[in-house]
Amino acid sequence: MAFTWILFISTVISHICKGNAAFSYVECKTENVGQYGQESLLECIVKTRRTTDLKMRTVAWKKDGLLEPLLVFHRGRITKALPGYSFADPSWTDTNRNVSLLISNTAVQHQGGYSCDVTTNIGGEEEPSRTSLDVSAKYTVPTIISHPETIAQNTDGTLVCTSDGGYPTGELRWFDEKDEWIKRETKVTETKSGLFNLSSTLTSKQGFKSSKYSCAVFNASGGLQDKVQLNLPNLNGRPEEQGTGERSDSVSRVVAPMVVIGSLIVGLLMLLVYYRRRSLRRRRGAHHEVAVEETDHHDEDRVAEEAEQIA
């Protein structure tokens, strides 16, 4: 008999709440996007068609697939809050109509559907309002490793491209020097955190046909995130011509001053040699004049002596 009365009272209260449901309701943003490792916000606002003061009696946030609530406000206080979950407003009170849920450190397991059940002083909705969270993580810039490290001309070789830490599943694509897509399989490996690591291999027999290869990572929506290029030796055995203009300019900037300095040094050396030779010539000329003068004096003395003997 007592159970019957309890059931009757519960039914009456339920009908009363349903009757008042039209006066307050929760409006949530249908879809939310969160970045891995950052804060995520599930937006929900309580609205009413009455002008009376509105107060929250209960607020309960739940995630699909979990039995335990994430955040519960009841009888004027927060009675439950799992680590990493809170109201978006840190100074939230029962008069605050913003009941949005804040996730402090977004992880892959936070992705999914959520429900927000609110009861106010003028009633509540029959069914909890629903929203969802999509989690994304950007992949790292791709890296290309060649095996062997230096690929010789007309020999077998392998290029391996990797990109890590992304979500949802992405794709790696190879491109040649003409930017034409070379279709190769992308290997996907899931980590303990739920993120994905990507790898793709490009193998060639008897040498690669292109001197440049690019590897690009695309997200789950097909959008390009990052791209990296690797230059290989020219197929004809000539040095790679990429950037020769820039290198020529650099060489010219270095060589031109050296040529000028070298010309000045050579000019100075030639000038020193010239003055050296001129000095030597002057010295030789002076010695020659002295020798001739001494010879002339000697001849005059000899003639005088012979004249005296004849006399």
Image: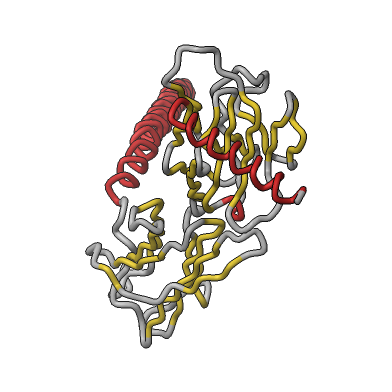
Q: Position of residue 219 (x, y in %)?
A: 40, 56
Using the image, determine if residue 208 lies above or below residue 226: below
Q: Residue at x 39, y 63 (%)?
A: 215
Q: Is residue 238 left or right of residue 41?
A: left
Which of 290 and 83 lies nearest the eye of the viewer? 83
Q: Position of residue 221 (x, y in %)?
A: 35, 56
Q: Position of residue 143 (x, y in %)?
A: 49, 60
Which of 279 and 118 lies nearest the eye of the viewer? 118
How many numbered marks does the figure carry?
Answer: 0
**Extreme residue in the bottom direction:** 205
Residue 208 visible here: yes
**Extreme residue in the front direction:** 1
Task: Please tell me in which quadrant of the rendered image residue 152 appears.
Answer: bottom left
Q: Position of residue 136 (x, y in %)?
A: 49, 50
Which of 146 and 50 lies nearest the eye of the viewer? 50
Q: Residue at x 51, y 68 (%)?
A: 145
Q: Is residue 150 left or right of residue 239?
A: right
Task: Please tell me in which quadrant of the rendered image residue 76 appears.
Answer: top right
Q: Residue at x 47, y 31 (%)?
A: 25
Residue 284 visible here: no
Using the image, determine if residue 271 lies above or below residue 171: above
Q: Residue at x 41, y 81 (%)?
A: 203
Q: How is the image coloured?
A: secondary structure
Using the image, determine if residue 218 lies above or below residue 292: below
Which of 310 and 296 lies nearest the eye of the viewer? 296
Q: Is residue 285 left or right of residue 69?
A: left
For the C terminus, the image quarter is: top left
